[in-house]
Structures are given as structure tokens and as C-alpha cells.
Image (spheres, rainbow, N blue to C red):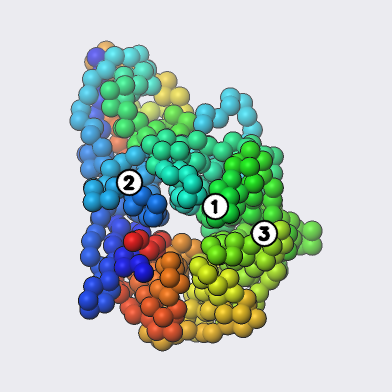
Amino acid sequence: MARSILVSTRKGLFTVERGTSGWAVAEADFVADNVTLTLHDRRDGHDYAALNHGHFGIKLHRKAPGGTWEEITAPAYPEKPEGLVDLDGWGKPVNWTTQMIWALEPGGADEPGVLWAGTMPGGLFRSPDRGASWDMIRTLWDMPERNKWLGGGADIPGIHSICVDPRSSKTVRVAVSCGGVWVTHDGGATWACKATGMHYGHMPEGEADDPNTQDPHRMVQCPAAPDRLWVQHHFSIFMSRDASESWQEVKAQPSSFGFGVAVHPRDPDTAWFVPGIKDEKRIPVDGKLVVTRTRDGGKSFDILRNGLPQDHAYDLVFRHALAIDDTGDRLAFGSTTGGVWVTEDQGDHWQMVIHTLPPVHAVRFAG
Amino acid sequence: MAKVFFTSNLRRHVDCAEAEADGSTVRAVLDGVFASRDRIRGYVLDDQGALRRHMTILVDGQRLRDREHLSDAVGATSKIYVLQALSGG
């Protein structure tokens, strides 16, 4: 059962720990710097923190168990070929430079030290050595379909979700805003777009269901039942029962719009979301912050509000800011207004840890 | 040799004390500095070697013109200041 949470914020990394009297902030690192994402690698206990220094670019830091933070190599794009015209789906030139580390995941249990990183403007990277070096997965980057990818949530496309299949480390699924879901079964040698069934409600016919321009905000895979994946999409919620071969829409109340999604580690029918009014507003419905939970594969949803602010709450929860621990009992989320909440009973009751942090980008259980 | 001064805001993140290096262009001088302190490179230049979007460089008081290739000329006693641009907020 996880007793520690890494909270990445606009102004630092805060470690929340479970003490005898409850959850509280125990440590602050990188204070005043923009920490956008962390990874706690359960295989070896290393922590990773991605920073966006604005003027000075994207950096990556690592901390060994019991050690201190040290800067390591950040994923970097290869030299852009002279004269190459490389445009995104909007027709804008693609800058071959890491502009955000938007996904950080460990490789499989049989690949110690292997890490995956998804970035803006759409590059996927693999490290064989705990981030000492990174190789760009050129097979994905060089596909002509990438030039249809669009910015979503940012001006440029990005890979924000990476799911290494627990049955084979060579099967990896990535989700792209906006570029659908891409799957490899051979460790990255070949890729196929697997977003059939996802669709937008407001796009012209022919565009609405193009798998390669879908905007999955976040994708998660059930560890114990890996054929089941859940996606919080820009337009709605989608679920796959067949390992991303097809996707079905799921409707939730009070809204199907949101960014984050968590799936129970053993029960693929149980998933959580933090809804908001759809894209043009992006605030909780009626100013009431709630979490929605389905226990029946999306047929019905519980609206969970016990312990959450129900009066003039304008918290938005970003795509990496909702997390679940290995037991499936503990969840945590952080908001754009600096609130962090934890539950120990799958969302029936929430405890506010703090409400004065900087805007929260990401939340992750660690040890 | 040209002298290179880095914005004090960078010192919080990386060792970047004042340095000297030979070279007839900004690129050559900076490459000389980065040869022994490679970590600075990624804080100043992007992955393609261009000056980062919200950085600026002054050579003897003149703003760098060639942000992509850093081909601006440098004299033997030039002073090069690497600064964050106000465009970055």
C-alpha cells in the first residue's frame, strides 16, 4: 500500500506522505522550478523528475534510493535533415527540439533500467540505462502519418501516455494528443494506429472518426486484465475490451469531459474520472468538484463528492494528476488551484491534504 | 580570446562561471566553452543547436543576428553575454 505521493507543480516537487495523523507534505524539491512530471520506478526505487525551465529548456533529474537529485540526460531530438519540410497537421513547421516530457514510464519487468519517454512535439524515446542515454524511436517519428498530428492541450502534438503491456515488453501502446493511439508488438520496429471507434462530436463528417487525429487526453491499461484499456478523450470516455483493436464510447454524468483516468489494478470494470464542463469552459459542473467512478465497465457511474469542495470550486485536474496505487484502494489527485486530495477507500471518502500548492501538473504514488 | 559571461539566473542550475575561448564566430567561441562544460550547452541552445527561443546573446553590445547558426563575427577581445530574453516573461 503506497504511503508516498509525488506531486509535480508549476513551482516545485512536493512529496506527500502518510503519517500517523494522515497525509501531509513532507518534502519540497526544486522549489520555484516548473516540475511537469515524475516517475517512481518500482523495479529499482529510482525517482525521476522532468522540469521545464522555460528559457533554459527541458531537463531530467534522477534520484537513487536514499540519494539526492542529479541532472541526467534529457531526451533530445536528432539533427533535422537539411532542407526537410516537416509540417504538423496545422501546416506549421515542426521544431525538432524537446519541448515537454509528457510521459515517463518504466519498461517491462524483464527490462531493468529501461525507460520510455513521450515528448512534445511528438517524439517517443527509449532509454536502456536509467536515463543516462536516450534513443528516439525513429520508426514512429518518420511515419508520414505523423504530419497529420495536431496540437491538443498545447500548440504542438505530444505523446502523453505510454502503456507497456504486462504480457510482453515488446508490445507498447502510446496515446497522442492529437494523433490517436499507436501500437507496436515488436519493440518499436513497426507501428499501427489503433483508435478505431473513437470520434469527435463536433467535427465534419469524414474527420470525426479519423483514428490518426483523435485526441485521447489520457490512456491507462488494467495490469491484471491488459486487454482492457480506458481513455479519457477530448470528446468523451472510450473503453477497449480487445487490447485497443476497437473502442466503445462510454457516457458519464455529470460530464464525460475531463483529462485524467485511473483504472483499478485488478478489476478492469472499475475506473475513475474527474469531470468538468467540456472544452470551452473546463471547470467543474456547478462549481462542485467531484470524481466519477464506474464499477460495471461504464454502464453506470457513482458521483463521489464526500470531502471534496462543493461550493465555488474551479479546480481542473490535468491528465497526469489523477493516480491510483497498487492496491486499488488509494487514489490521489491534484488541481490547477493547488489542491491535493487522497482517498483510502476507492473514492467514497476524500481527505484534503493541502489547498495552497502551486498549480498541480501531475500526481504519482511512490513506494 | 573572447570572454563569455552567462546570466546569473543560469548559475542556479548549472556551473557557468565566466569563460574564455578562441573563435571567429559566436558558434566557435561557445563550442570552445562547451567543450569542457557540455552541460551548459542544452541550457543555451536547443536540440538543433539554435539559440533557445527565449534566450539572447550580445556581442560587444550588439544583439545576435543569426539565432540559428550563430555565425555572427567575434573579435579577439570581444565580450559575449548570454542572457535570458524578456520575451520569456
Q: Helix, strand or loop at disc 3?
A: loop
Counting residues from the start of the chain, the first of labels 3 and 2 encountered is 2
Residue A164 has which mark? 1
Tell me, yes or no, whether dots 1 and 3 are on the same chain.
yes
Chain to which the residue tagged by mark 1 belongs: A
Q: Disc 1 residue type?
A: Val
Labelled pair 1, 3 in contact (Cβ < 8 Å): no
Amino acid beneath label 3: Ser
In the rendering, at what x and y percent does residue B39 appear? 31, 32
Marks 3 and 2, how far apart at CA: 32 Å
Quadrant, the C terminus of chain A:
bottom left
Compare marks 1 and 3 and give the one earlier in the sequence: 1
Please state which of residues A120 and A169 is positioned toward the viewer in this rendering. A169
Residue B14, percent across and down? 26, 37
User: Can you identify the residue that label 3 sits on?
Assistant: A244
How many numbered discs?
3
A217, A83: nearer the viewer: A217
- Compare residues A15 and A216 and report the one nearer the observer: A15
Which of these two is toward me, A283 or A181? A181
Where residue A307 sits, quadrant-wise, is bottom left
**Outermost residue toward the right in this view:** A205
Q: Position of residue A315 (x, y in %)?
A: 42, 74
Q: Residues within 10 Å of mark 3 (few under 14, many from 20)?
A: many
Q: Is residue A347 above or below residue A124?
A: below
Q: Which of the chains bears the disc numbered 2? A: A
Q: Give a yes or no on whether discs 2 and 1 share a subunit.
A: yes
Q: Earlier in the sequence, mark 2 or mark 1?
A: 2
| Residue to which mark 2 is pinned | A62
Does A357 appear above or below A50? Answer: below
